[in-house]
Amino acid sequence: MADCIFCKIIKREIPSQTVYENEAVMVFKDINPVAPTHWLAIPKQHIDNVADPRLLDGSLLQSIFGAIQHLAKTEGLSENGFRVVVNCGRDAGEAVPHLHFHLIAGRKMSWPPG
C-alpha cells in the first residue's frame, strides 16, 4: 500500500526508533507511548489487520511472536510482565490499517483496558 505510514517506516522514508528487525518483522517505538515501554511490532509485508486470512499460514505469526518473545527476554520485560494488544477496525481503536502488535510494559496495568 503506497500511502501506508508503516510501509513508509519499513522503507525508511519516515524515520523511526527501531528496537528490533529481521527479514520479516520490524519493531519500533510508538510515537504516542502509553507506558515507559510501548513498541509496535509489524510485519514488513503489508497486511491490513489481524482478520487477514494470510496470517493462517503460521510463519508470519511465528516471526512476529518470536520477535516479541526475544525482546521480552532480552529487555527484561518478562520479569514484571507485559501486554500485547492487537486492534482490528476503527471501533477497536485501530488507527493505522497495517497489522501491528502493541508491546506495552513498564507500569502496572488495569483491566478492562478501555
Image (cartoon, rainbow, N blue to C red):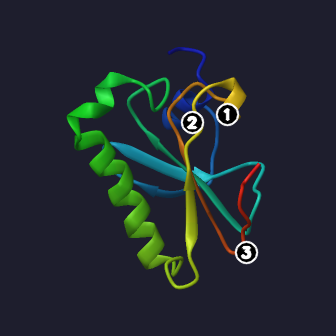
Q: Work out whether residue 95 can be spotted.
A: no
User: Residue type at mark 2?
Assistant: Ile
Q: Is residue 43 above or below residue 75?
A: above
CB atoms at circles 2 and 3 under 8 Å apart? no
Q: Position of residue 93 (x, y in %)?
A: 71, 34
Task: Categorize mark 3 by other alpha carbons within 10 Å: few (<14), some (14-19), many (20+).
Answer: few
Closest to the observer: 55 or 5?
Answer: 55
Disc with the residue nearer the chain's start (3 vs 1): 1
Residue at image mark 3: 107
- Please, what secondary structure does the residue beneath circle 1 have? helix
| Mark-to-mark CA distance, 2 and 1 | 23 Å
Disc with the residue nearer the chain's start (2 vs 1): 2
Q: Is residue 77 left or right of residue 30?
A: left
Residue at image mark 1: 92
Q: Is residue 96 left or right of residue 19?
A: right
| Mark-to-mark CA distance, 2 and 3 | 27 Å
Residue at 39 percent of width and 45 percent of height: 25
Residue at 55 percent of width and 43 percent of height: 86
Residue at 45 percent of width and 32 percent of height: 50
Label drawn at residue 9: 2
Disc with the residue nearer the chain's start (2 vs 3): 2
Q: How many marks?
A: 3
